[in-house]
Structures are given as structure tokens and as C-alpha cells.
Amino acid sequence: MHVHVYCERGEAKFWLEPVIELAQNYGLSQRDLRIVQTIIEEQQDEFNNAWRRYFRS
């Protein structure tokens, strides 16, 4: 499971399992990556549930 993050400064991909981990980064600063990772950690359950609902069909 993974999520993609896009903004005007760049984009990144984070693995959600088995642990939240940066997979790829294209232009985001370390500060941006820390902020994004914090948001992902706080919303991990929502991401996991949405992924499972979407791919269950």
C-alpha cells in the first residue's frame, strides 16, 4: 500500500505498510517530507481503510 503526494514544489511516494516509509522523492525538501510523513502517520487508518475499500471491488 502506498500514497502519492503532489504539490507545487514536487511530489513523493510513501509506503504505508509494513511501516510508513519514503519510497521516492522528486523535489520536496526534507522539511516538506517531515510534514507530509506526520500527516500520513496521523491519518494512517483513513488511508488504509480507503485503499481497502477502493481495491476490494
Image (cartoon, rainbow, N blue to C red):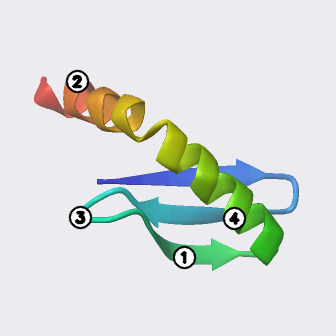
| Quadrant position of the N terminus in the picture | bottom left
Q: Residue at x 72, y 56 (%)?
A: 35
Q: CA distance from mark 3 to mark 4?
A: 19 Å
What element does badge 4 sit on?
Answer: helix
Where in the figure is residue 50, as x and y percent of width and height?
33, 27
The residue that disc 2 covers is: 53
Mark closest to the chain's N terminus, 4 or 1: 1
Q: CA distance from mark 2 to mark 1?
A: 25 Å
Where in the figure is residue 23, as x and y percent of width and height?
47, 75
The residue that disc 3 covers is: 18
Q: Is residue 51 visible?
A: yes
Tag 1: amino acid? Gln
Q: CA distance from mark 2 to mark 3?
A: 19 Å
Tag 3: amino acid? Pro
Q: CA distance from mark 1 to mark 3?
A: 16 Å
Mark closest to the chain's N terminus, 2 or 1: 1
What element does badge 3 sit on?
Answer: loop
Task: Evaluate if marks 2 and 3 touch, with contact meaning CB atoms under 8 Å apart.
Answer: no
Mark closest to the chain's N terminus, 4 or 2: 4
